[in-house]
Image (cartoon, helix red, strand yellow):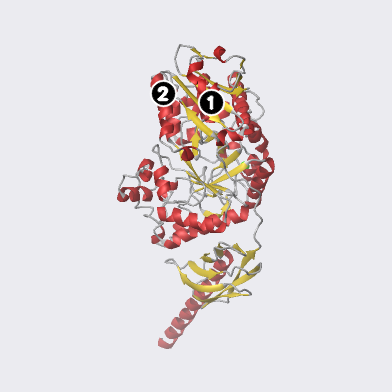
C-alpha cells in the first residue's frame, strides 16, 4: 500500500513540477513575444542623452541585462513595483553613430531574450514654421472633421467602434480626412491648423477627443499611423500652413498599461475606486492668490472616472513625460506644441519640460491652454519660461459674446472690450490667443443668439484685435453648439466630412444662403489678414469708448486700419473728423472691408447701428 502510494505522489509531484515549468516557459515565451520598450528608439547627437526605458511585459526573473553591439552605457536597471515592468537607465554618447543596439535580458527561467533598440540619424528640421502674432488658427477634433478612410472606423482591438448616433462616441474622422481637406483650411484664410491629440486612446468611453492616452508612442489606429501623421505635418508645410499639436501631460487613460497593470501606485493620484473627483476649477490653478494646497488638490482631481491623473511629484513620471514629447518632436518635425489644460501640470514639470526643449531646439513655440477667465500672464511669467509662449485667453470669448448682445447694455459692452486690453502689457497682448470658440466653449454663433450681424461684429473684433485669433471648425458655417447641453454638443460632425452627408460645407452643397454669406465674409477677412501680416504684429491704439462707440487702430510702417464698432441698438454713427484727427492725418480716403464701401471723404463714413467697420486707410 505505502510504496504504491509514495510512487503515485511522486509521479503526481513530478507532473505538477513539469506542468509549472511548461506553464512558466509558455508564459515567458508569450511575454517575450509581447515585450516592448518605450521609447523604442532615440537619435544621435541629442543633448537629452540620459533616458529611462520602460520595458513592458518584462521577462520573468530577470537576472541581468546587457546592451550589445553598442557604446550605449547601461547605468542601471530595476523592476517597477509591478515586475511586469522594468526600468533601464541608459546614457547615449553624443557622437555615437546610428546603429541598432541589442538589449539582452538574461532570466532564471528561460533562454535570453534580445530586443532591438535603434539609434537613428537626426532628422533635418524644416525651415521656419513657428507661430507669430499674425497667424490665425483653425482648431479641429480629428474624429469630427472628415472621415477619409472607412477601413479604420472599426478596429477589432479597439473598445469603441464607429457610432455616429452616439454624440460622445467615435465617429470615424481621421488623418486621411484632414489631409484631403487642407486646401479647404488654406482657402478659408487660416494660417495654422491645430488638432487635438492623436496618440492612442483606447478606452471604453470618452475617447473621441483622445485627451487620455493609452499609448504615448502610437497614433490611434482609428486616426491613422505615424507615417500618415508625418505626411500631415509635411503637407501643411508645403501648403504654407503652420501646425500645432496639442499634448495632454497631466492624465492618461485608465486602459493605459501603466494604470491598468498598476506599474507603481506612486505614478498616479488615486485608484479606480478612490480618487478626487470634483471637476477642477481652472481659475484656481493660475490664480496667483490661491493657496498651494488648493491648487494641488485641483491638479490631482480626475476629469472623468477613466482619466487618472499622473503624479508629477514623481521625478520618474516627469522624465517619462518629457521623453515622449521630445520623441514626437524629433520623429515628426513638430514646431508648435500646445499643452492642453497646462496648469494642471505641476510647475516643476513645466519648468523641466521647457528647459529640456530649450536645450534641444531653438525653433519651438509653445501654447499654454488653461481654461481660466483670469489673466494667466502672472502665473506663466513666474515660471520664467524660456521659449516663446502664447497664452490662450479664456477671458475674451465671454466678454466678446456679451459685448454685442441686444440683451446687454451696449455701453457696458464697449467698455468691457476696451477694459480687457488694459489688463495686458503691449508685448503680452500680442501673445494672446483669442478664442472665438473652441472645443470647451459655446460656439460663437450660439453666443451670438444665432444672429449673423452680431457674429460679424464678433469676428471683426477678433480678427483685428492684438493676438492670434482662433476659430473652431464649422464656425465658418455658423455651426451651433451649447455647452450646457453636454460637451459633445460642441463637437458635432463637420457637414460633408462623411460620405452621403445631406449637406456639404466643403462644397457649399445644401448650405443656406445665410451660411454661405457668413462663410464668404469670414474667408474674405481671414485672407486679407493673411496678406497683411505686418499690421498684426504692429501697433495697437484704442480710444476711450464714447457711449456705444468703440474705436481702435492697428498700424504697421506701411499701413493703418481704423476699426469702429457701433454698438448702439438704433443710432447710426456719422464720422467726426475731430475724433480721429491724429490717426487720419496723412490719409485721404478709405475702404470698409465689411461693406466694401469706398469713402473718398472721411466725413461720409457711416457705421450703422449694431455693426463694425474695418476701414483700411489710403493716401
Ligand atoms: Ca475613418
The residue depicted at 56 percent of the width and 12 percent of the height is 604
Q: Residues within 10 Å of mark 1 (few under 14, many from 20)?
A: many
Q: Nearer the viewer, residue 556 or 324?
A: 556
Is the N terminus in the top left, top right, bottom left or bottom right quadrant? bottom left
Q: Which mark is residue 396?
A: none
Is the C terminus in the top left, top right, bottom left or bottom right quadrant? top right
Badge 1 element: helix
Image position of 284 (left or right of 9): left
Q: Nearer the viewer, residue 206 or 439?
A: 439
Mark 2 Cβ inside 8 Å of ligand 1:
no
Which residue is tagged 1? 460
Q: Nearer the viewer, residue 462 or 64?
A: 462
Instruction: Give ligand 1's quarter of the image.
Output: top right
* Count of number-bearing discs: 2
Image position of 201 (left or right of 499): left
The residue depicted at 59 percent of the width and 66 percent of the height is 33
Circles 1 and 2, Cβ within 8 Å, touching? The answer is no
Residue 165 placed where, x, y %?
Answer: 53, 34
Residue 257 placed where, x, y %?
Answer: 49, 58
Of all residues, the one furthest to the bottom in this rendering is: 3
Residue 250 placed where, x, y %?
Answer: 44, 51
The residue depicted at 37 percent of the width and 45 percent of the height is 285
Which residue is tagged 2? 413
Residue 512 visible to the viewer: no
Is residue 54 depicted above or below 398 in this figure? below
Of all residues, the one furthest to the right in this rendering is: 238
Residue 467 placed where, x, y %?
Answer: 51, 36
Whole-Å distance between the Cαs marked 1 and 2?
15 Å
Amino acid at each position: 500500500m505505502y510504496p504504491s502510494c509514495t510512487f503515485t505522489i511522486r509521479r503526481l509531484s513530478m507532473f505538477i513540477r513539469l506542468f509549472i515549468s511548461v506553464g512558466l516557459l509558455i508564459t515567458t515565451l508569450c511575454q517575450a513575444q509581447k515585450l516592448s520598450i518605450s521609447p523604442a528608439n532615440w537619435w544621435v547627437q541629442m543633448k537629452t542623452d540620459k533616458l529611462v526605458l520602460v520595458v513592458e511585459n518584462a521577462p520573468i526573473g530577470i537576472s541581468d541585462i546587457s546592451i550589445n553591439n553598442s557604446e550605449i552605457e547601461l547605468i542601471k536597471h530595476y523592476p517597477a513595483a509591478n515586475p511586469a515592468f522594468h526600468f533601464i537607465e541608459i546614457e547615449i554618447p553624443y557622437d555615437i553613430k546610428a546603429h541598432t543596439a541589442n538589449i539582452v535580458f538574461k532570466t532564471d527561467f528561460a533562454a535570453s531574450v534580445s530586443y532591438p533598440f535603434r539609434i537613428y540619424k537626426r532628422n533635418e528640421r524644416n525651415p521656419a514654421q513657428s507661430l507669430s502674432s499674425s497667424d490665425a488658427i483653425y482648431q479641429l477634433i480629428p474624429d469630427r472633421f472628415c472621415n477619409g478612410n472607412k477601413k479604420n472606423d472599426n478596429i477589432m482591438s479597439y473598445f469603441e467602434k464607429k457610432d455616429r448616433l452616439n454624440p460622445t462616441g467615435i465617429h470615424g474622422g481621421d488623418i486621411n480626412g484632414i489631409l484631403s481637406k487642407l486646401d479647404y483650411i488654406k482657402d478659408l484664410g487660416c494660417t495654422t491648423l491645430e488638432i487635438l491629440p492623436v496618440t492612442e486612446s483606447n478606452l471604453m468611453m470618452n475617447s473621441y477627443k483622445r485627451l487620455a492616452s493609452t499609448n504615448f508612442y502610437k497614433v490611434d489606429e482609428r486616426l491613422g499611423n505615424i507615417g500618415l501623421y508625418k505626411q500631415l505635418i509635411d503637407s501643411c508645410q508645403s501648403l504654407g500652413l503652420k501646425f500645432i499639436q496639442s499634448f495632454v501631460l497631466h492624465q492618461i487613460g485608465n486602459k493605459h498599461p501603466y494604470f491598468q497593470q498598476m506599474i507603481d501606485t506612486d505614478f498616479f493620484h488615486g485608484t479606480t475606486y478612490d480618487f478626487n473627483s470634483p471637476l477642477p476649477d481652472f481659475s484656481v490653478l493660475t490664480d496667483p492668490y490661491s493657496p498651494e494646497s488648493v491648487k494641488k488638490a485641483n491638479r490631482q482631481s480626475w476629469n472623468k472616472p477613466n482619466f487618472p491623473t499622473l503624479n508629477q511629484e514623481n521625478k520618474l513620471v516627469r522624465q517619462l513625460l518629457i521623453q515622449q514629447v521630445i520623441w514626437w518632436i524629433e520623429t515628426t518635425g513638430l514646431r508648435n506644441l500646445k499643452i492642453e489644460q497646462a496648469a494642471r501640470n505641476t510647475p516643476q514639470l513645466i519648468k523641466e519640460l521647457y528647459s529640456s526643449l530649450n536645450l534641444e531646439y531653438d525653433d519651438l513655440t509653445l501654447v499654454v491652454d488653461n481654461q481660466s477667465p483670469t489673466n494667466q500672464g502672472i502665473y506663466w511669467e513666474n515660471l520664467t519660461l524660456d521659449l516663446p509662449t502664447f497664452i490662450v485667453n479664456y477671458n475674451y470669448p465671454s466678454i466678446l459674446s456679451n459685448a454685442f448682445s441686444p440683451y446687454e447694455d451696449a455701453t457696458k459692452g464697449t467698455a468691457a472690450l476696451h477694459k480687457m486690453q488694459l489688463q495686458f502689457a503691449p508685448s503680452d497682448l500680442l501673445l494672446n490667443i483669442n478664442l472665438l470658440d473652441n472645443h470647451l466653449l459655446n460656439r460663437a454663433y450660439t453666443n451670438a443668439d444665432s444672429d449673423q450681424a452680431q457674429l460679424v461684429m464678433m469676428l471683426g473684433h477678433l480678427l483685428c484685435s492684438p493676438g492670434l485669433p482662433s476659430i473652431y471648425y464649422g464656425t465658418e458655417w455658423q455651426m451651433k453648439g451649447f455647452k450646457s447641453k453636454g460637451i459633445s454638443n460642441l463637437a458635432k460632425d463637420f457637414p460633408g466630412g462623411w460620405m452621403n452627408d445631406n449637406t456639404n460645407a466643403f462644397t457649399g452643397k445644401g448650405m443656406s444662403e445665410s451660411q454661405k454669406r457668413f462663410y464668404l465674409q469670414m474667408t474674405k477677412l481671414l485672407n486679407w489678414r493673411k496678406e497683411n501680416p505686418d499690421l498684426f504684429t504692429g501697433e495697437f491704439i484704442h480710444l476711450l469708448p464714447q457711449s456705444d462707440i468703440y474705436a481702435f487702430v492697428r498700424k504697421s510702417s506701411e499701413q493703418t486700419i481704423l476699426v469702429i464698432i457701433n454698438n448702439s441698438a438704433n443710432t447710426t454713427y456719422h464720422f467726426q473728423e475731430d475724433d480721429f484727427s491724429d490717426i487720419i492725418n496723412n490719409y485721404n480716403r478709405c475702404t470698409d472691408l465689411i461693406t466694401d464701401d469706398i469713402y473718398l471723404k472721411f466725413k461720409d463714413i457711416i457705421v450703422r447701428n449694431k455693426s463694425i467697420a474695418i476701414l483700411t486707410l489710403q493716401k
